[in-house]
Image: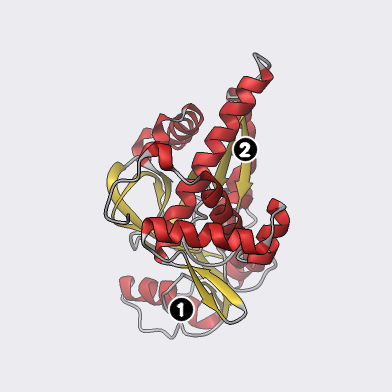
Amino acid sequence: MADSHIDRKWLPLNALRAFEGVAKHLSFTAAANALLISQSALSRHVIALEKIIGAQLFERRPHALVLTKAGQHLLPAVMKSFDRLEFALDDIRKDGASNTRTLRVHMPPSFAAYLAVPILRDFRRAAAEVEIDLVSPHGVGAPLGDVDVAVVYSKPTVTDLVTDLLWPVHLSLLCHPNIAARHAGKSLAAFIESNELVHVRIAELPRHHLWKQFARSANLSVGVERGLVFDTAMLAVQYALSGEGVALVDTYLFGDHIRSGRLVQPFSNSLDDGFGYYLITHPEALSDTAVALFRSWLIERFGSGAQLSQSNLHLAVSND
């Protein structure tokens, strides 16, 4: 069966629902309770689905259940398919009532904290029929598989995702005005040596990666493997706002703090190491009116000068 085409009329819908439930909970017991069926029946559905596709969907470890590569590939397709069925059935059931479409959007924490409110407020005014379900998980890794569109902080590499560059990141030194005044007149190297450094952790890269890249680009022989390390740029900036340390962060993302004078940029040096904020969309989702509307609206908001749309980019996703 695994080598033959699966005809639509034989799609195992109950087994797919069972798989979705187990994948969401990563527990047969919790999924059985949620679906109101016995655990043995749930297990039989999942085993039957694995036999049909000829691949194992879960790795059953002691005290843990983990999706295999096949399971990770199948889950977003199943969830989106059921979501669309649910929306279509709801639309028919409402029979002409005012319809809304809920769009599940992933944004990294710092982007969400500093830009999500004005972005989503203005989008809701422009498209009141589209509701937004915002997810902004902390931690490393790719966006959740069940989102419709995602903003990510990333470097581009090859894949089949549709990507739009919102803006390229330029990292510069930002600090509290008191720190800049206290060390006025010092060279860049002396300024760095005299202050506590604030680092932002990047997934799968060394803890002090950004500062090392900055020192190398500025031809500085200074020690940068010291100071505090935060998981997000948002936390690094909050620390700098308290009057402590020098953060190396994106000047566009934190432009409001610079314009208000809460933070200053004591040196013009910047680092462009290829990272940017990208909007990513699955190609098949572009036919969804709500997805297409949000995508075009967001691209227009950030201006045509920052756009780069390609369908052959993969995003090596990291924390922002």
Q: Amino acid at mark 2?
A: Ile
Q: Using the rendered view, name the quadrant where residue 206 is placed.
A: bottom left
Q: Position of residue 228 (x, y in %)?
A: 58, 79
In the image, taking residue 128 as reference, residue 212 lies left or right, namely: left
Q: Is residue 38 above or below residue 259?
A: below
Closer to the camera, 208 or 45? 45
Q: Secondary structure at mark 2?
A: strand
Residue 295 visible in the displayed image: yes
Closer to the camera, 5 or 63? 5
- Residue linked to disc 1: 208
Q: Position of residue 140 (x, y in %)?
A: 51, 67
- Residue linked to disc 2: 132
For the point 42% across and 71% down, which residue is it?
Answer: 210
Q: Using the rendered view, name the quadrant where residue 23 is placed.
A: bottom right
Q: Secondary structure at mark 1?
A: loop
Residue 265 visible in the displayed image: no
Q: Amino acid at mark 1?
A: His
Q: Is residue 99 above or below residue 117?
A: above
For the point 62% across and 46% down, which residue is it?
Answer: 134
The answer for how far apart the CA atoms under marks 2 and 1 are is 36 Å
Q: Could you tell me which quadrant the N terminus lies in?
A: bottom left
For the point 60% across and 65% down, which residue is it?
Answer: 26
Q: Which mark is residue 300?
A: none
**Earlier sequence position, callout 2 versus callout 1:** 2
Categorize mark 2 by other alpha carbons within 10 Å: few (<14), some (14-19), many (20+).
some
